[in-house]
Image (cartoon, grey):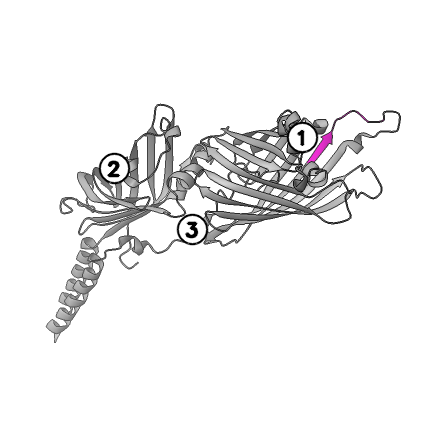
């Protein structure tokens, strides 16, 4: 009987760990590319925080706007000061759900193509976004990748007419994050 | 008895897993990693008007400065209110790192060469590391290369040299308002009379108010402590606007100082605002990225 209780305990602990398992990253990579006739702009952020709940497919993502690194310091300053107004809107975030979380087995090696849908908040404006995403599982590590395009004007970022040839209306966003299992106790 | 324990355990575990599963704010699970956030862009460029601002040139960036001061407005219509004349300074500032800036310049006024070193000691920040102010130190020197007024007397090369040491302490109080103080020592190897001091102490105060993302107004005043300069010299007062257009910052201003280097505008300002001894002038700053920052790190 005691063995029975022990077995039940182990089973319960194990299953709760698997079902409720969460994966996280604190150094996800987010890059964006603006490809305008006059100037190509790109910036990289390697400090994105994200958590995936494998049980229900919920995921969240957040980046500090000031942590985007540009090739040109002045561009970085203008990005923060004039366009993103990062002292007022310090973060961009995403809160959404992975389609068919049942199919996605983050505890089994493999590659999974799926869609992610949710709310993307940039510059204080929230829009619904759906993007294809790929999850690659290798020995407990999960690499999530997604690429999508947004319209700058959708997020209320104003571009003065004098620089309209230097900044594309569309910005491509490229995400790559390496997730690790979160310790269930933490 | 046993089955009761089992049920209790079962309930307890399912409650735990439920609590986890229903978390709506997943990111809060990561805890609050405090990061240090540095204040940026307290001023649009590394000068307020004449004074150095608390900002430095970013690492790997070259800032080409073209500064003009037209003649005094009280020259009247004959001098086209000063626009017939212009003094200028051409300069290059380079950010060796985000903290250390070096610069050189040449002014038509007094045919001066100048150079400076500027180092940011403290950076205003919030978050993990809290620092209420930015503190920078500036050392500049200049060489007056005008031919000697009296070549018959003993003239020493050292008499052509001037040195300025300045602390810049300031704070970006809000997105709109930045203020700074600049206690300064100007050392002049040669002065005209015994009454004038070789070492001149002064206190500069400057600020900017940002009106829009691309437009700001600036003001600076330099108070020279009494009984150090001759009677013809006055405190420097300058008012201006900064207009930013992509890669350029245009600074348009009115100032009673003719010189655009520290020892000049602090100790040799002859214009008087109340008598129209005011120059219209501008600084143009154009930056070039020499070192790619993303590779730099």
Per the rendered image, the range of residues in magenta is B141-150
Q: Which residue is mark 1?
A: B75
Q: Quadrant of residue B119?
A: top right
Q: Nearer the viewer, mark 3 or mark 1?
A: 1
> To which chain does the residue with label 1 belong?
B
Alpha carbons under labels 2 and 1: distance apart: 66 Å
Residue A21 in view: yes
Check the picture and name the quadrant holding the N terminus of chain A: bottom left
Residue B219 in the image, given as x and y percentages of width and height: 57, 43
Answer left or right for B55 relative to B155.
Answer: left
Alpha carbons under labels 3 and 1: distance apart: 56 Å
Check the picture and name the quadrant holding the C terminus of chain A: bottom left
> To which chain does the residue with label 2 belong?
A
Residue B147 in the image, given as x and y percentages of width and height: 78, 24
> How many other residues sit within 10 Å of disc 2, few (<14), some (14-19) or many (≥20)?
some
Q: Between B157 and B200, which is closer to the camera in this rendering?
A: B200
Q: Which residue is mark 2?
A: A146
Give the farthest residue toward the bottom: B1
Q: Secondary structure at mark 3?
A: loop
Q: Say if B208 sits above or below B108 in the image.
A: below
In the rendering, which numbered label is found on residue B35? 3
Mark 3 touches mark 1? (CB < 8 Å): no
Secondary structure character of the magenta stretch overall: loop
Residue B88 in view: no
């Amino acid at each position: 009987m005691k063995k029975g209780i022990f077995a039940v305990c182990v089973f319960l602990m194990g299953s709760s760990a698997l079902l409720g398992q969460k994966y996280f990253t604190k150094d996800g990579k987010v890059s964006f590319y603006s490809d305008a006739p006059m100037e190509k702009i790109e910036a990289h952020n390697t400090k994105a925080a994200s958590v995936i709940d494998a049980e229900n497919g919920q995921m969240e993502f957040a980046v500090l706007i000031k942590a985007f690194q540009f090739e040109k310091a002045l561009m970085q300053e203008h990005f923060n000061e004039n366009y993103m107004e990062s002292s007022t809107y310090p973060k961009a975030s995403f809160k959404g759900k992975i389609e068919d979380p049942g199919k996605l087995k983050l505890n089994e090696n493999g590659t999974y193509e799926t869609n992610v849908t949710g709310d993307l908040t940039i510059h204080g404006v929230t829009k619904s976004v759906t993007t294809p995403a790929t999850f690659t599982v290798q020995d407990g590590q999960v690499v999530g990748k997604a690429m999508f395009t947004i319209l700058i004007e959708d997020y209320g970022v104003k571009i003065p007419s004098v620089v309209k040839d230097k900044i594309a209306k569309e910005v491509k966003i490229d995400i790559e994050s390496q997730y690790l299992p979160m310790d269930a106790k933490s | 008895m046993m089955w009761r324990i089992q049920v209790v355990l079962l309930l307890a575990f399912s409650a735990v897993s439920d609590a986890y599963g229903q978390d709506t704010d997943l990111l809060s699970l990561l805890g609050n990693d405090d990061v240090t956030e540095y204040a940026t862009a307290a001023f649009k460029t590394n000068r307020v008007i004449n004074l150095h601002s608390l900002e430095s040139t970013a690492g790997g960036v070259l800032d080409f400065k073209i500064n003009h001061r037209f003649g005094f407005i009280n020259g009247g219509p004959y001098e086209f209110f000063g626009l017939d004349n212009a003094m200028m300074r051409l300069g290059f500032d380079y950010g060796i790192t985000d903290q250390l800036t070096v610069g050189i310049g040449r002014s038509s006024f007094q045919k001066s060469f100048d150079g400076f070193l500027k180092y940011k000691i403290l950076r205003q920040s919030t978050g993990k590391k809290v620092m209420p102010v930015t503190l920078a130190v500036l050392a500049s020197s200049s060489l007056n290369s005008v031919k000697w007024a009296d070549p018959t007397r003993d003239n020493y090369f050292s008499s052509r040299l001037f040195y300025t040491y300045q602390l810049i302490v300031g704070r970006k109080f809000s997105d709109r308002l930045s203020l700074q103080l600049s206690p300064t020592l100007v050392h002049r190897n040669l002065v005209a009379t015994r009454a004038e001091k070789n070492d001149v102490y002064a206190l500069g105060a400057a600020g900017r108010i940002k009106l829009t993302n691309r437009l700001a107004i600036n003001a600076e005043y330099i108070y020279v402590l009494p009984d150090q300069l001759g009677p013809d010299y006055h405190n420097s007062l300058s008012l201006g606007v900064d207009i930013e257009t992509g890669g350029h910052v245009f600074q348009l201003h009115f100032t009673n100082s003719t010189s655009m280097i520290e020892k000049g505008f602090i100790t040799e300002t002859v214009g008087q605002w109340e008598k129209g001894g005011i120059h219209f002038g501008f600084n143009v700053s154009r930056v070039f990225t020499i070192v790619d920052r993303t590779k730099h790190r």
